Amino acid sequence: MMSKYEKNTAPDVKWQDITLAADVFEGGTAAAIETGDWRTIKPVIDWDKCKQCLLCAPVCPDMSIPVTADGKRADFDYFFCKGCGICANACPFGAITMVK
Amino acid sequence: MAYNLKENLMQGDRLSGGHRFCAGCGSPIAIRTVLRALNPEDQAVICSATGCAEVSTFIYPYTAWKDSFIHNAFENAGATMSGVETAYRALKKRGKIDETYKFIAFGGDGGTYDIGFQSLSGAMERGHDMVYVCYDNEAYMNTGIQRSSSTPMFADTTTTPQGKVVPGKQQNKKDLTKIMVAHGIPYVAQSTFIGNFKDLSEKAHKAIYTPGPAFLNVMAPCPRGWRYPSEKMMEVTKAAVETCVWPLYEVIEGKYTISYRPKDKRPVEEYLKMQGRFAHMFKPGNEWMIETVQKHIDEKWEELQNLAEIK
Amino acid sequence: MAIRERLSGNEAIAFAMKQINPDVMGAFPITPSTEIPQYFAAYVDNGQVDTEFIAVESEHSAMSTCIGAQAAGARAVSATSSCGLCYMTEMLYIAASDRLPITLAVSCRALSGPININNDHSDAMGVRDAGWIMLFAETNQEAYDNFLQAMRIGEAVNLPVMICQDGFITSHAIENIDLVEDDKVKEFVGEWHPEHYLLKKGESMSMGAYATPVYYMETKRAQAQAMIDAKDVIKKVGAEFGKMTGRTYDLIEKYMMDDAEEAIIIMGSSAGTAKEAINELRAQGKKVGLIKVRSFHPFPAEEIVDALKNVKAFATMDKDDSYNGHCGPMHAEVTASLMAAREFGPLGINYIYGLGGRDVKVESIEKVFAELEKIAATGELGETYRYLEVRE
């Protein structure tokens, strides 16, 4: 994600250029951070079993179960998913399994 | 408008992925649910006390907050939000702002029950139009699982270790929700993660859109500190509710309403046994500890039911 | 035409606040600054200002609300003293590092213990490293004038400003004062237009980051530069204020320094007492003078070195102590300034004076000059860390 302030926030930024008070002037810049590499096991969905009840979506701590504009859950966002497994346990239909 | 999980989720989240909360943490679940209770067209300023939520969501230059956000210190989310909300009124009065903003402060139980208690009390007493949300994980998790006044009796924490002489924390959990009710504010509620999140979502919406101060206490388990497998989150919160360890209720203008009454109130063991922090209570000879907790929970549940009877 | 009035120092500050009509005030009562929020609350309740006044439950919350309000895009002010300033300490650091130009009036008072409500500078000196611009007033007039200049200075460099005066000595004593007309104040102070703020339309910002070692030091270096830059701003604003009122301000004020051989360096109301002592000694033909420090932070290092260049002996007067076993905080600044300038000419000693309201008389200052005269004559410094007017 290109940011207007990229040169003011880069790890090699000089003190003369760093954003005032280490403030950030955009929302949601953390979306550039991959937390999926924390994962040791990952959830996999069996679409044949999924009834689109969406009970898995609100339990995710990592915004890794996207709900699309037509009101359906999409596949996992493995860029963020840390593999906690809450979704697999919350699924009433056994549609999510945690795999190595 | 009736709650609908699908519509609620279709709004999208106001907290982004890429935050550094632990895998399976309850705190971001509480936060994202509360933020989805904002009407999508409304602006918000969010404040967080120092704690897990702050250090996980805003490591420069990466912020997980899509709305404007301020972290100030550990003990002053209430006062900081008071200042922001007051500035909003001042600038609006002077015609310098035209949009509608809502103000939501988040603090863990350390920043809310303990060190930030005075600041919270002051903010609520003064009547600022804001919501304070405690994500209650019953100890100082950010510094490594030290007891807070929210830690339940007998819990094994790093400052109340279950030792040969003293078996964990020796005091009951402070009943902060009722203390907030005693402030005479228009809306107070207790919630956690249950089923389709109707309970928390509706309470968050009421808290945000009730004029004046509101307080929301959300049990948000910490798999590290409570020592349960992270995938068991929803089982743990369900057990807390079914045993009445964490009853769901709300208090509107002083009137108590119990949101959910278990048909078959479960014994506290069912909740305690899921968590390593209570494991020592199940050793032979320690039955008295479970009985003590059961008695306390029964008394508190009885008290709550009596309060809900008052017209 | 300026308005002639008779006001206490606290009332003068409250009046300046009224003329500025800031967006938000958050304050908590503590002697001797209590009158400031009292007067101001009356202005609010009588509709003379439309500031939102938050009567908070502690000084910690007073500064916390100011930080929230200023971050949101409002001008925020507060007032405090003594333990109240101490209690704010953590938030003072955050206000400065968040680069929020909050204005805080301090009616300086001793710190506990023993508990004491009278004046010294231990409260302000205790927070001297918090990153605030700190201006000290000798008189009620200066307290008022400094407050009117504070926002112009702080907002130019994005730093908070502390306007200090001596508790009771000026905060409660009623003196003649020249007030600036409301419209001139409004024009001079102007409006604050921050580039980024929490309530800015169309922009979400996050403030109060966790900064890893990759970023922390650059952030602090930038903050240090703001304090360096503040020196010129203080002078410029002081000169502009002079054009408007005839009262020009600088970082220091020199009194009878042109040919002075012995000098004292002093801050706050006691400068007035010292000027009287100097007048008497000058009448006796003694070449004595005074350097009054108006801006403690940023510290006028070059200016003081320059003012001392022809002085044989000087005493730094600290109305507080560092309890480091050898000198008070201003003496540490002065001697460091001389050392940095490779200026080893003047012989300097340090007096700790006026703690907890201990009276400083003209004769007290004369005693200091008598000691300096001896040192200048003999070249013998003797004990450099001395207490003035203590029974022994």
Image (cartoon, helix red, strand yellow):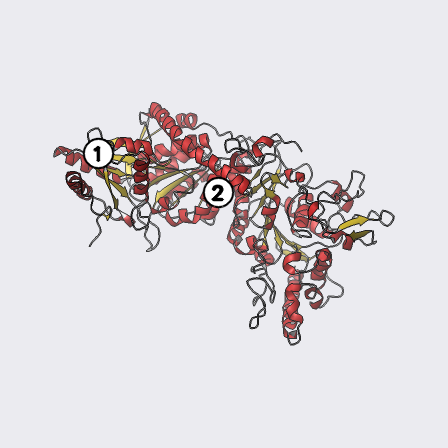
Q: For this view, does B20 lie left or right of residue C107? A: right
Q: Residues within 10 Å of mark 2 (few under 14, many from 20)?
A: many
The part of the image, by quadrant, that contains residue C207 is: top right
Numbered disc in front, either 1 or 2: 1
**Earlier residue among tags 1 and 2:** 2
Residue A62: tell me if it is visible.
no
- From where the camera sits, is residue B128 visible? yes
**Mark 1–mark 2 distance (CA, rounded to whole Å):** 40 Å
Which quarter of the rendered picture does the N terminus of chain A lie within? top right
In the rendered image of this protein, does residue C247 appear above or below residue B261?
A: above
Q: Between residues C118 and B205, which one lies in front from this camera angle? A: C118
The residue wearing badge 1 is: C311
* Left or right side of C26 for B88: right
Q: Chain of mark 2?
A: C
Residue at image point 67% right, 52% down: B25
Q: Chain of mark 1?
A: C
Q: Position of residue C121 (x, y in %)?
A: 32, 45
Residue C94 circle label: 2
x and y, in percent, of residue B134 in the image: 61, 52
Q: Residue at x 17, y 38 (%)?
A: C376
Q: Quadrant of residue C290?
A: top left
Q: Amino acid at mark 2?
A: Ile
Query: What number is the disc on residue C26?
Result: none
Question: What secondary structure is marked by label 2?
Answer: helix
> What is the x, y in percent for residue C274?
22, 38
Q: Secondary structure at mark 1?
A: loop
Q: Residue A82 at what x, y percent from top left? A: 70, 48
Residue at 45% of width from left, 29% of height from top?
A: C156
- Is there a contact, CB below 8 Å, between mark 1 and mark 2? no
In the rendered image of this protein, does residue B132 appear above or below residue C19?
below
Amino acid type at circle 1 is Val
